[in-house]
Amino acid sequence: MLRRIKAQTMNDADYVYNESSLNKIDGKRIEHEELLLDGSKFFIFKYFHKETVGEEKTTVKYVGNKDMSADTYNFKYIKDGAEPKEETGLTLDELKKRIQKIKELGFVTTYLNNKSGGAIRKKSKVVKKRLSKKKPVRRGSAKQKRSADSANSFEMW
């Protein structure tokens, strides 16, 4: 479901943070993904980390989103294939306290602390017009003047 939401909302988002990597070192495979999308109609964050050594897997997954109709947040986490734990109806302050305890979600904490008021808006550039309407005067080179003088002068032998 998150992939479908991600594809639909990437273009509508006012703020997008997406960091993912896949490393294979000495038979150890490490997948890592951090995602944060913020827009006027949604707020979604996701942290996923999976380490695979042979047949052993260690997985950590955190997902959070905002219920826009109730202005509350939902938070879900899964560790090592255990039963998913979900918290619903959290206020922004409760969510911040919950996230600050988890060091892996530092990117979300940083964003929520630096965010002021609403979503970050895209700024447009202002282009200044040229004040003077004067056109620059083009002056010919000395070589052009000499060649023009020699063409106009007519000498008889």
Image (cartoon, rainbow, N blue to C red):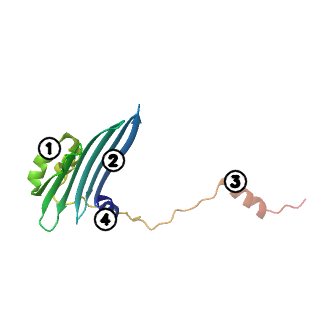
In the rendered image, residue 38, in percent from the top left (x then y), is placed at 24, 59
Tell me the distance, in whole angstroms, between the alpha carbons under discs 3 and 1.
75 Å
Q: Earlier in the sequence, mark 3 or mark 4?
A: 4
Residue 87 shows which numbered tag?
none
Task: For the N terminus, give its image quadrant.
Answer: bottom left
Crowd band around label 4 with a 10 angstrom C-alpha radius: few (<14), some (14–19), many (20+) = some
Q: Answer left or right for 135 relative to 102.
A: right
Q: Provide the secondary structure element on which disc 4 rests.
A: loop
Q: Which residue is mark 1?
A: 100
Q: Earlier in the sequence, mark 3 or mark 1?
A: 1
Foreground mark, 4 or 1? 1
Tell me the distance, in whole angstroms, between the alpha carbons under discs 3 and 4.
60 Å
Task: State if disc 3 and disc 2 touch (CB < 8 Å).
Answer: no
Crowd band around label 3 with a 10 angstrom C-alpha radius: few (<14), some (14–19), many (20+) = few
In the rendered image, residue 10, in percent from the top left (x then y), is placed at 33, 61
Q: Earlier in the sequence, mark 2 or mark 3?
A: 2
Q: Which residue is mark 3?
A: 143
